[in-house]
Image (cartoon, rainbow, N blue to C red):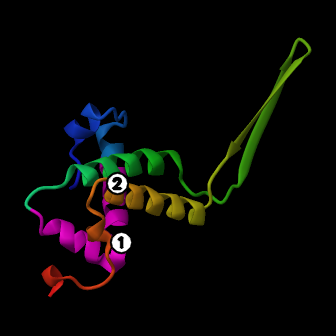
Amino acid sequence: MYLDYDTYLEMGGNLDNSAFTRWERKAEYEINAQAAGKTGTRISKLEETPQAVKDCTFDLIQFLSDNTADGKTVTSESQSSGGVSESYSYNVLGKDQIQAEAESIIYNAFYGGGIGDLLYRGLTNDDV
C-alpha cells in the first residue's frame, strides 16, 4: 500500500475507508503497471515509499474515483423557472481518456518528484 488512510485524510481526501481502499488498490495497480510492471518492482525494493509516489497515489485516487468509464460521452440537463433557463453539460471521460489522464498523472508526479527513473522501460543495474 503506497498511501494509508490516515495520510490520505491528512492530504485532504474525503472518501470513506472502504471507498478509499478500493481506489487506492486501483491507483497502486496503475502505478505498478508502468514500464511493463518494472515500476512496481522497483518501488517495492525501496526502503520507504517516496513522497512523490504518495502524492501520485492521492491524485490518482481523486481522479479515478471521480471518473469512471461508463460508455457515456456527454450528459446534460436543463431546467427553467420563471422565464430563466439553465443548462448543464457534463463531459464524462471514456476508458481511453481515463487511461491517458492516469498515465499523465503518474508521469508528472514521478518526473516532477525526481523519481522518473522508476518509469524507465529498459533494464537498470538494479533489475538484473
In this picture, residue 113 sits left or right of residue 81: left
Residue kind at label 1, given as amino acid type = Gln
Q: Mark 2 packing: few (<14 Cα in 10 Å), some, or many (20+)?
A: few
Instruction: Kindly report the distance in space between the C-alpha atoms of the residues bearing marks 2 and 1.
Output: 16 Å
In this picture, residue 105 sits left or right of residue 52: right
Q: Give the range drawn in magenta.
A: 21-46
* Residue 103 part of the magenta-drawn span: no
Location of residue 49 with respect to 36 vertically, above or below: above
Q: Quadrant of the N terminus?
A: bottom left
Label 1: state its secondary structure: helix
In this picture, residue 110 sits left or right of residue 99: left
Q: Which of 20 and 124 is in front in this view?
A: 124
Location of residue 77 with respect to 116 vertically, above or below: above
In this picture, residue 60 sits left or right of residue 46: right
Residue 114: assigned label: none
Residue receiving disc 1:
34
Count every numbered label the image shows and give the total.
Answer: 2
Q: Residue at position x 30%, y 47% from top? A: 55
Q: Where is residue 120 in the image (x, y as percent from the top left)?
A: 31, 75
Residue receiving disc 2:
112
Q: Residue at position x 34%, y 60% from top? A: 111
The answer to which quarter of the image holds residue 32 is bottom left
Q: Residue at position x 35%, y 80% from top? A: 36
Location of residue 112 with respect to 33 vertically, above or below: above
